[in-house]
Amino acid sequence: MSRLVLKFGGTSVGDVDRIRNVAAKVKAVADAGNEVAVVVSAMAGTTDQLVGLVRDIDPRGDLREYDVVVSAGEQISVGLLAIALQSLGCRARSWLGWQLPVRCDSAHGAARILGIDADAVVTAMANGDIAVVPGFQGVSPDGRVTTLGRGGSDTSAVALAAAVGADRCDIYTDVDGVYTCDPRIVTRARKLDRITYEEMLEMASQGAKVLQTRSVVMALKHRVPIQVLSSFADVPGTLVVDEEDIVEDETISGIAYAPGEAKITLVRVADRPGVAASIFGPLANAGVNVDMIVQNVSEDGKSTDVTFTVGRDDVARALKVIEGVRDEIEYERVQADPDVVKISVIGVGMRSHAGVAHTMFRALAEKGINIQTITTSEIKISVLIAEDYKELALRTLHTAYGLDA
Amino acid sequence: MSRLVLKFGGTSVGDVDRIRNVAAKVKAVADAGNEVAVVVSAMAGTTDQLVGLVRDIDPRGDLREYDVVVSAGEQISVGLLAIALQSLGCRARSWLGWQLPVRCDSAHGAARILGIDADAVVTAMANGDIAVVPGFQGVSPDGRVTTLGRGGSDTSAVALAAAVGADRCDIYTDVDGVYTCDPRIVTRARKLDRITYEEMLEMASQGAKVLQTRSVVMALKHRVPIQVLSSFADVPGTLVVDEEDIVEDETISGIAYAPGEAKITLVRVADRPGVAASIFGPLANAGVNVDMIVQNVSEDGKSTDVTFTVGRDDVARALKVIEGVRDEIEYERVQADPDVVKISVIGVGMRSHAGVAHTMFRALAEKGINIQTITTSEIKISVLIAEDYKELALRTLHTAYGLDA
């Protein structure tokens, strides 16, 4: 017997039949003798529709009221799922974010969960009842409705799993697990049985949208094992676990890509202390999210080039900010290139294996793919290449690291 | 300067443009120097859609979860209206039913308001802020979401007006006031400037669906003046007030009809004590709503006829109940007639005017309309006639009582 938190996304509860399907899945897990709580998202399309209504009235509308409106989606789905479970003979009830409560900070529209008072849920679960809890929503310290930002329901589920001391958090989604690479591009991609939190985190932040990054951070922090599996197929998914729980020791677990990025290079920036702060401080203040940052050593001791990536939608804003601090930074010129893609190879195994980088660079070189910039972390090597080569690069690397099915 | 509660129904907030229109109306009232709170219904169609989802999953679904689902409609509209008000430069915020709270009993799906803790709203209003509160929803003693039943938003508005000590509760709707008769049938119907609570109560329960009956009961109990007026036209509406506030002393204020009723007659029922209880107790237990009840004196001292009306949808159920207690009641036979309509003339003035009934009976007789049964109250005379004569009867009586415009 395990204590489990099951999470179902918007597609999984997209209509009445799918809600019934979810109820049947939940019942099967409960009937197998497990203690069960369920976290659900809004029915697919509902949140977009609610966000659209707010935007139609005022795109800069009060985020506190925005939260009141958009949290209604999850309120609807928890009630419907509770009824669907009851109609299958389960004892089930819903708790809304304010009822537990799910305590959040006051960052409306993108709140962080501070903690969940889960006594009621634990009591219900221990009693054999199925607790149904909305993802995405919570309540601020001053008692107002908050939401966690888009995709926040994964985080809600992991936070609830941590709060009730669950043995595992099962995230049901429209894919059946985490793959070595995007199967739409690399047809020989394999589903992973297990992956570490750290690898999953890199995969998630590199564009593999299976789990929300924040939910992985929370799972890592509270050591909550996650399983990613399909709502529609009845097969085991991928376990996201601690490194010591990984049996096979593959060097590289997966290859990810981050689309939609653009490269900006400041050519011949004065090479003196504080210049990086002068560049990235104003960008942060302007709300421009910077991903990769590359700065090489200065050749002449006087100037260097600084390259960074931002979301393509942010290029114009970033250039304006850079223009505004020209006097301070004293760069020669600025170049922007929106046609780039970041490719990353990820694996905890690379720490103990030499030659991982070499394999990457050689494989890309053999296909004539030029590497524009390189950054590395403990468990990741990322390169920026021209976007035209995205598919070729992914397939080439997938084969080079022996990941093909 | 007055303290006002304004209420807008689902049609008035049916889309984004209409929500903007409501915001402009509310702003105008506030700009005129009034303290303002607003109560809103769900956007037209939303509640039906949510009720439909619940029914699709399980028509007998848990009413506590039903309330969670259907209350989402008002949650959406309060947030949107608050944003619309803010975008016009007003200071506005929403409070949900659980936030004030609006304290209700536990009769989920048809809860009664026990009281509203309106301190926060009073403080906001006194501060020049516009409080936006959802109709229809509240919270039970054990902290679960409740709803008041369909059309409950009028009651929410009057209850809030009572709680904040409002000078008036303005109910904005899709008609511009209360008419002497249904203007779709009687083209010469006039809008009333004023009507008493008691008359409005009779009008409402007789099918004039301008205000929900419960809201009028609550207004009468707390002596909250109501104004019924149009969301779309900018003209004064009808005031619902105490009798002493009525200036003109018309005998008859209006003529109402109750469609959708059916007549059931128990022929030759044993005339002995307790028989009425034996008939109507089981009907009430079966959830059959009985409206009119007529029993005449027994001619022979042994048996009498009992006639009552029920909703047409309830006829089959009512007959089954009556069949089940046949041994106890000892009636000869039972007759059902679904083709009837109840016509009522209503007016506090009839207490002091003789001849009101005579005018009614003579006017109908002159048109050859047969009266099947008659019941009277202090301020109302109702007759049951064949439904074919509905329009003719209404127009005839409207003229007979001098109500034509």
Image (spheres, coloured by chain):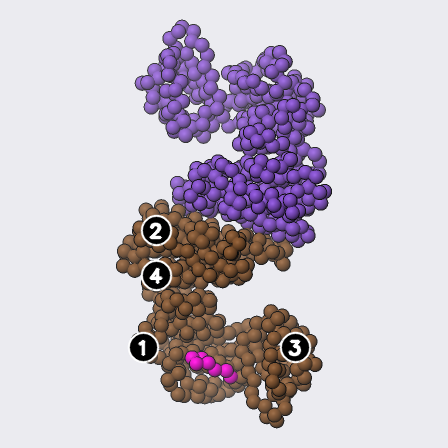
Chain colours: A brown, B purple
Residue B333: percent from left, percent from top = 38, 16
Q: Quick one: label 4, few (<14), some, or many (20+) residues within 10 Å?
A: many
Task: State the residue lying farthest toward the bottom.
Answer: A300
Q: Do the residues labelled 1 and 2 touch (CB within 8 Å)?
A: no
Q: Closer to the N terminus: mark 2 or mark 4?
A: 2
Q: Do the residues labelled 1 and 4 touch (CB within 8 Å)?
A: no
Residue A186: percent from left, percent from top = 43, 75
Q: Distance between the residues labelled 3 and 4?
A: 48 Å
Vertical position of residue A316 compared to residue B295: above or below: below
At numbered mark 4, what does the secondary structure look like: helix, strand or loop? loop
Query: Which residue lies under the disc numbered 2?
Result: A124
| Mark 3 chain | A
Q: Give the range drawn in magenta.
A: A374-380
User: Is residue B207 in sight in this rendering?
Assistant: no
Q: How far apart are marks 1 and 2 (CA)?
A: 38 Å
Query: Which residue lies under the disc numbered 4?
Result: A166
Q: Quadrant of residue B199?
A: top right
Q: Closer to the N terminus: mark 1 or mark 2?
A: 2
Q: Quick one: label 3, few (<14), some, or many (20+) residues within 10 Å?
A: many
| Mark 2 chain | A
Q: Quadrant of residue B109?
A: top left
At horizontal 34% and vertical 71% (from top left) the residue drawn is A193
Query: Which residue lies under the disc numbered 1?
Result: A248
Query: Which residue lies under the disc numbered 3?
Result: A322
Residue A360: percent from left, percent from top = 45, 85
Most prominent secondary structure in the magenta stretch?
strand
**What's the amino acid at mark 3?**
Ile
Residue A132: percent from left, percent from top = 40, 52
Q: Distance between the residues labelled 2 and 4?
A: 14 Å
Q: Closer to the N terminus: mark 1 or mark 3?
A: 1
Q: Quick one: label 1, few (<14), some, or many (20+) residues within 10 Å?
A: few
